[in-house]
Amino acid sequence: MSKNEMYDLIIVGGGPAGLSAGIYAMRAALKTVLIESGVPGGQVAITKEVENYPGFIEIGGFDLCEKFLLHAKHYELEILEKEAVATDPGIEYHSVRLADGTLLKAHAVILAAGGTARKLNIPGENEHFGSGVSYCATCDGFFFRDKIVAVVGGGDTALEDALYLSKITRKVYLIHRREAFRGSRILQQRVFAEPRIEIIYNTVVTAINGDDSGVRAISLKDTQSGAQRDIDTEGVFIFVGFTPNNTLVPAGIKTNGTGYVITDEKCETDIPGIFAVGDLRQKYANQIVLAAADGCTAALAAAHYVETRKDAQTCQAAG
């Protein structure tokens, strides 16, 4: 790689969506580079166990990501361990600027930067991630069958996942910092009717307590009285929001009210040749298999876009 390198496709992000895009791009014979500043695999790489990816009854998150990475490397995908800082749309080509000043050019760009679950930023949260602390009930709920868990949040996701967990666990504490939920009325009615869910309003979690084997309890504080107490629980599911990593999304690309990129069925944004995939784009659900599918779709669409662009340039040169 050199400065001002020209590619057919630049992929920003090395999670399941980005690596899947890389695999399909290489199979389509596109000159492709993937940029990833962190550990390949994204959020999945720090997930303890994955049991809902087709073909694997159970596999560690890091192991699954390693398989994605090895598959991409099998096709000799170029991977840069660099930080991308800007995406600049253009008429002749698009470009991605790296933190070291390098400018990469390409006919097409796939943005696969993913997203980040918002944290409570309390003691014990990071220490027990993957051993009792989770941000995805459908991913990790199975591990808490017949156990007592806590759900933190008051929006639709918190209510939906509390209901989901109530079918698996012995008891669910639903903890919300306000005196009323923000989630939809129908979800609230279902929560109120579920005997396994105990609602705790006007309360925040101040610490997650445990040992080397996992979470054992959480510390609570009443936001009105200031009273503090601990409750026993083996799992804490935190749903206080999810932030798409959209800082590289250029101006002019439509996003929804929460920052997710709006695309068409090809994962293409309203700037031709720029695609958004995985947890960065607006869609019904965020799952590993859906992120991988997005990567496939965007790479195939990008291949068609690049071929069309090159044919048009050839015609212009000949004319």
Image (spheres, rainbow, N blue to C red):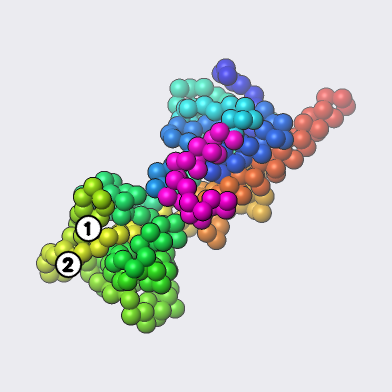
Q: Looking at the picture, how far across and down is residue 132, in whole percent?
A: 31, 55
Q: Give the residues drawn in magenta, as a range.
A: 49-71
- Helix, strand or loop status at disc 2: strand
Residue 1: mark:
none
- The residue located at (45%, 32%) in the rendering is 37
In the visual, does 257 lie left or right of 272? left
Observer-nearest residue: 52 or 191?
Answer: 52
Q: Is residue 63 above or below residue 220?
A: above
The crowd level at tag 1 (other Cα within 10 Å; few <14, some 14-19, many 20+) is some
Work out whether residue 120 can be spotted.
yes
Which dot, 1 or 2, sits closer to the camera?
Answer: 1
Q: Please state, as top left, top right, bottom left or bottom right, where the N terminus lies in the image.
A: top right
Question: Which residue is at 61% across, 21% downward?
Answer: 5
Q: Which residue occupies the extreme bottom position in the image? A: 193
Residue under label 2, please give it. Answer: 222
Vertical side of 142 occupied by 58: above or below: above
Q: Amino acid at mark 1?
A: Arg
Q: Label 1, on which residue?
A: 216
N-terminal of the two: label 1 or label 2? 1
Callout 2, which amino acid?
Answer: Asp
- Asked whether 63 falls inside the magenta stretch, the response is yes
**Residue 250: horizontal and vertical position, in percent?**
54, 41
Q: Position of residue 185 (x, y in %)?
A: 42, 77
Give SS at disc 1: strand
